[in-house]
Every structure is written in structure tokens, then in C-alpha cells.
Image (tube, helix red, strand yellow):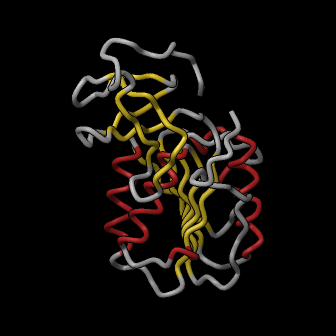
């Protein structure tokens, strides 16, 4: 689904930054092909330290040996994104000047990584994000401020207040979510037809 909305992020393929002194690649939910590509790109850094953080078996499916294509890499595996993001916040306290963070995966994941990195003092230009995998959305309810995860339809119930939300194409980088507004605010009970919009 294409949008003319300028709030939608535009992604470019991740490139390695040779000016970095430390490189952390975080991935969750990315496609095998994209994960493979980024690992090869990071492999061009030579002997510069690289850490590869993955959720579950994301990297187990990366062809060409996955993390093995990076001889100097350290692999870290996590049970879930929440665990990884918590570990990232902790690890950034001891990070060196010149760290580069690369995030590949779903939009909610990569923008959550960016938020944690920026809160940890990493400059915005030192955090590279690229969308890969599912198009499911995280939706922020403007009424009760709850987040609904894994949304695939244009109308969805809010997990907080239960309102039927219309999922707008407006993306908030600050919230790492799309905006949801009450779909029947003007005429209670009159809802647009729910459509499967994102897989």
C-alpha cells in the first residue's frame, strides 16, 4: 500500500559506516535475504568489532552461514524484542564513543531500537534503520494512549479502551506507531468496512 503521507518513513538499504569504532546490528522479523545482505555489508568492515543481536532464530535462517560470514562478530540471542531492547539500554551505558547501531526488521521494532539508542545518547545519524518483513502495524490510540500491536486491518479494536479505531497512515517516529482515531466518532456505530490492509 503506497501513501503520499510525508510522515511515512522512507528507508534506504543499510550501509556500513567505516567511521564507527563499534558496530551493533539488531534484527527481529527480517527476511532471510535482507538479513544476509546486511551481514555481508557489515563484513566489509574487516576487523572492526561487530555484534549481531537477534531474536529467537532470526539469524539461524540467514544463508551463507549467518553470523559466520563475520569472523570477528559476537552473536547475542534473545527470547523476545522486549528482552533485546532492555539489554540494549543497559549495554549503551558502557558503549564507546563512535558506536553505530543498525536495526533491521518490522517498523515497530526498528523504531523502538532507534528510540532506545537515542535515549542512550547515540546520535540520530549513528542509528541506521531499515524495514524488512511483516507490514503489521503498532497503533497508538489517541484517546487512551494505549498501543495495539500486530494490526493488519484498517479498523481495529483498541486494546486499551475498546474503541474501534481507524488506522491512519500517519506514522509518529516519537511513538514508533501509527495513529488510531475513533472510527465512529461522528455517528456512533457507523463504521467503515474493515479491510485486510497489511500482512
Above or below residue 64? Residue 16 is below
Residue at 70% over, 81% down? 18
Extreme-front residue of the structure: 186
**Observer-nearest residue: 32 or 180?**
180
Q: How many marks?
A: 0
181 is higher (above) or lower (below) than 7:
above
Residue at the spot 59% in from the left edge and 70% down from the top edge = 50
Q: In which quadrant will I find the C terminus? A: top right
Q: Is residue 155 left or right of residue 62?
A: left
The relative height of residue 29 versus residue 50 in the rendered view (above or below) is above
Q: Nearer the viewer, residue 190 or 123?
A: 190
Task: Give the side of residue 26 with respect to residue 89, left or right.
Answer: right
> Where's residue 113, x and y in %?
46, 58
**Measured from the top left, where is residue 103 in percent x and y?**
56, 58
User: Where does the image place residue 146, in percent across and percent down from the top left?
Assistant: 27, 39
At x 65%, y 44%, the residue is 132
Q: Quadrant of the N terminus?
A: top right
Residue 70 drawn at (x, y percent): 69, 63
Amino acid at each position: 500500500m503506497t501513501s503520499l503521507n510525508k510522515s511515512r518513513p522512507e528507508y534506504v538499504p543499510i550501509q556500513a559506516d567505516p567511521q564507527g569504532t563499534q558496530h551493533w546490528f539488531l534484527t527481529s522479523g527480517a527476511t532471510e535475504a535482507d538479513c544476509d545482505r546486511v551481514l555481508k555489508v557489515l563484513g566489509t568492515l574487516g576487523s572492526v568489532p561487530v555484534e549481531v543481536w537477534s531474536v529467537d532464530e532470526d539469524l539461524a535462517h540467514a544463508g551463507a552461514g549467518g553470523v559466520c560470514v563475520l569472523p570477528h562478530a559476537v552473536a547475542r540471542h534473545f527470547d523476545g524484542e522486549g528482552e533485546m531492547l532492555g539489554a540494549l539500554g543497559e549495554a549503551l551505558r558502557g558503549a564507546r564513543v563512535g558506536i553505530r547501531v543498525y536495526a533491521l526488521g518490522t517498523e515497530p521494532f526498528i523504531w523502538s531500537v532507534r528510540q532506545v539508542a537515542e535515549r542512550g545518547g547515540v546520535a540520530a545519524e549513528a542509528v541506521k534503520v531499515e524495514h524488512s518483513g511483516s507490514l503489521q502495524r503498532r497503533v497508538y490510540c489517541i484517546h487512551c494512549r494505549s498501543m495495539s500491536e500486530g494490526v493488519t486491518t484498517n479498523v481495529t479494536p483498541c486494546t486499551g479502551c475498546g474503541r474501534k479505531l481507524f488506522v491512519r497512515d500517519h506514522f509518529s517516529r516519537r511513538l514508533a506507531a501509527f495513529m488510531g482515531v475513533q472510527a465512529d466518532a461522528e455517528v456512533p456505530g457507523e463504521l467503515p468496512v474493515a479491510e485486510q490492509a497489511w500482512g
